[in-house]
């Protein structure tokens, strides 16, 4: 079973975190990332901007950052052992702005960036933000397949 740790750095802890956990579990199962540990942090722009500057040399807020724990390492595992998939950090401030900018529901945008982060942990990449990128198309396919899972 996957261990999902959701950390809220928001002023008030959202009452939908358990629904969010169920959504994340479904995406991880879809991607065959069972027996993994994953950490998701919901934060504000100030925190993610600091991380983006430190780890990507970009002095700006972003919607999602993924930190793979096993990138480039040969993974040794034992039966029943959980491996760390990594950490995903999501700025709810940027998420809200993008939701308005792209005229999509906040819940849909949260699901989209969560899927995006999980795919990066899985090793997928994209060169641009153009919708014809293979990873972004796959992300939208997963999003469409999880439409019945409500977070909010």
Image (cartoon, helix red, strand yellow):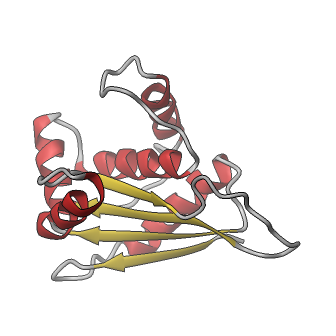
| Residue that lies at the very extreme toward the top in this rendered image | 132
**In this orientation, which residue lies closer to the viewer: 14 or 57?**
57
| Residue that lies at the very extreme toward the bottom in this rendered image | 12
- Please name the residue shown 39% across and 60% down the image: 151
Return the x and y of residue 78 as percentages of the image width and height: 86, 72
Return the x and y of residue 37 as percentages of the image width and height: 60, 71
Image label count: 0
Question: As drawn, is 135 to the left or to the right of 46?
Answer: right
- Please name the residue shown 21% across and 52% down the image: 57
- Picture quadrant where residue 79 is located: bottom right
Question: As drawn, is 131 to the left or to the right of 147?
Answer: left
- Picture quadrant where residue 89 is located: bottom left
Return the x and y of residue 108 as percentages of the image width and height: 32, 46
**In this orientation, which residue lies closer to the viewer: 118 or 76?**
76
- Please name the residue shown 16% across and 68% down the image: 44
Q: Is residue 104 above or below residue 37?
A: above
Quarter of the C terminus within the rendering: bottom left
Quarter of the N terminus within the rendering: bottom right
Return the x and y of residue 30 as percentages of the image width and height: 65, 47
Question: As drawn, is 68 to the left or to the right of 29?
Answer: left
């Amino acid at each position: 079973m996957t261990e999902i740790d959701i950390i809220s750095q928001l002023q008030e802890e959202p009452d939908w975190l358990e629904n969010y956990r169920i959504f994340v579990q479904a995406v991880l199962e879809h991607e065959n990332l069972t027996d993994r540990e994953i950490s998701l942090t919901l934060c504000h722009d100030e925190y993610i901007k600091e991380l983006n500057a430190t780890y990507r040399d970009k002095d700006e807020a972003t919607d999602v950052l993924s930190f793979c724990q096993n990138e480039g390492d040969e993974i040794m595992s034992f039966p029943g052992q959980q491996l760390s998939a990594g950490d995903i950090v999501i700025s709810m401030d940027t998420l809200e702005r993008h939701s308005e900018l792209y005229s999509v529901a906040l819940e849909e945008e949260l699901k989209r960036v969560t899927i995006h982060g999980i795919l990066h942990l899985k090793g997928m990449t994209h060169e641009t933000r153009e919708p014809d990128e293979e990873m972004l198309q796959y992300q939208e396919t997963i999003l469409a397949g999880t439409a019945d899972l409500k977070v909010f």
